[in-house]
Amino acid sequence: MTMLILVTAGIGSIALGAIVTVARISPLQVLRSAAFLYVQFFVNVPLLALLILAVFALPAAGFILPLVPTIIIVLAVYEAAYVSEALRSGVNTVPQGQIEAARALGLTFGKSLRWVIVPQAFRSVIQPLGNIMIALVMNTSLAAVVGVIELTAHVNKINFDYAQPVLLYTTGGLIYMAIALTIGLLTGRLERKLVIAR
Amino acid sequence: MHMGAMTRRTALATAVAASLSLALSACSMDQMALPGTSSTSHDAMEAIYKSAPVAKPELILPGWTMETIKKRGKLVVASALDAPLVSQQNPANPQDVDGFDADLAKLLAIYILGKPEVEWVPSTAETREALLSNGTVDVVFGTYTITTKRAQQVSFAGPYFMSGLAVAVKSDNTTIKGAEDLASKNVIVQTGAPSVTRVPEKVPTAKLMPFATTPGSVQALVQGRGDAFVQDYVLLASQSSTNKDIKVVGAPFTEEPYGVGLKHGDAEFKTFVNTWLSTMQEQGIWSKVWKNTLGTVGDTPMPTPPAIGSVPGS
């Protein structure tokens, strides 16, 4: 369950984060402001508060989704704010001259994004994105509070029976560590492969 | 430009702060309206404290845990602090904790110290054993079910109360009439409550949904996220007495003997607490505390206090 939440929320957050980044650098003031507010909101509200609001307050307003999709969506929109900040710094590494050259060649804003800016932006922030995914691994544990049986909830359950908190939570921690280290190693490899020689 | 950004940020911060404080005040309002925290029950407890027994000096010998507590001048108690009628902390005054378990803990403090001087440490199912074994607290007093597995980690005095798990459903539900109807249903349980292990034992096909708190679990039941909520029958009676959207169905389907958690192997302290519990029962103080707390809701008849040492692990 932890892996399911991690993979779906991870892909969702990168996709959504890319859209927010594009909005933040778009020529339209309205889109830029909306993306700015989005990032500020999700960076400044604790994830647990968002989860509890989504699980208990949204149904009161008439939106009710099963628990697992709710949690995946909340994690994806939350992490997307961080992804978009990382990507924006990636965009800033693309030399201004390249953007001007792309426009001079007759590429539209959309085309220069698609073929020039976004690919380079992604390549330069692989390691920071990896760190955000590692943070996401840790954040999936909050799902245990709102009724989803993932890794932490399993540990809670076993501990309730066996009363061995130190042993069990150390084991749980080691499993999280293994997942995080794997992501770290993978992103390290990916970065070496894709790094832009300048 | 700089000012513009500042104003936008301030406006955003104000909006967020306003909505959060609204949410927070809504929470504390709920807590205020809980039963069993009225001033009349407070006065009744004060009267009980005045007449409560104090241990004879020969029961507290040098080198024993009781003497350490007496020298310190207060009893350090771990409890959940968020369970209405059992141990409920007043959000406006953290020293003010009421309920069946909390009031008994204060009476134990009187027995040792002569005054209800208690330091409260919030505990969860994850921390109880560690708090006892590393000496952070003297006793764990909060719906702590005696089991033989736990008795390998901690010592239990008691049992001081026989509880049981019951099933609550939404008021308009007519298909679930008891635990036997829970097969392949979504069953809400509370993290760290006995239902986490008892429901799968009783109904292996039930799908568990563990929520962290009782209010959260009740909310999830009302919103239809699960078909039923399994919890201690006394706590469910308390919830359904104030919330007309839920009802309790069927009789309790397990026995949960609650004990006082003590450091593993502290035989003198265990005997001491057991002696105190017997005294509480003999002098009728146990019944008075029950009437004042758990007995204020529902129409549960007064239970008979369990015999000390009557369950495996105690």
Image (cartoon, grey):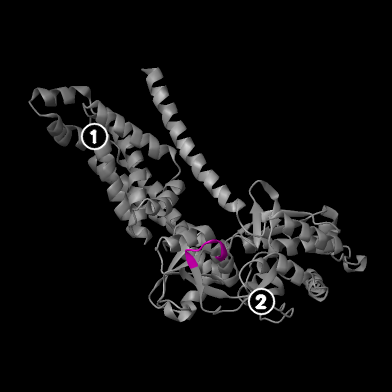
Q: Quadrant of residue A8?
A: bottom left
* Residue B301, disc: 2
Label 1 CA crowd tier, 10 Å (few <14, some 14–19, many 20+): many
Q: Is residue B27 left or right of residue B109?
A: left
Residue B35 coordinates in the image, percent (x, y): 63, 59
Q: Is residue B184 left or right of residue A32?
A: right
Residue B47 coordinates in the image, percent (x, y): 82, 60
Q: Quadrant of the N terminus of chain B?
A: top left
Residue B312 coordinates in the image, percent (x, y): 66, 81
Q: Closer to the camera, B303 or B279?
A: B303
Q: Please tell me how many numbered marks the rendered image carries.
A: 2
Question: Which span is picked out in magenta?
Answer: B241-246
Residue depicted at x 34% and y 56%: A64
Q: Quadrant of residue A104?
A: top left
* Residue A22, disc: 1
Q: Is residue B129 left or right of residue A102?
A: right
The residues tagged by marks 2 and 1 sit, at their Cα atoms, a distance apart of 66 Å
Q: Nearer the viewer, mark 2 or mark 1?
A: 2
* Residue A47, disc: none
Residue depicted at x 79% and y 63%: B107
Query: In the structure shown, which secondary structural element does the residue marked by tag 1 occupy?
Result: helix
The amino acid sitting under disc 1 is Val
Residue B12 coordinates in the image, percent (x, y): 41, 31
* Labels 2 and 1 share a subunit: no
Q: Quadrant of the C terminus of chain B?
A: bottom right
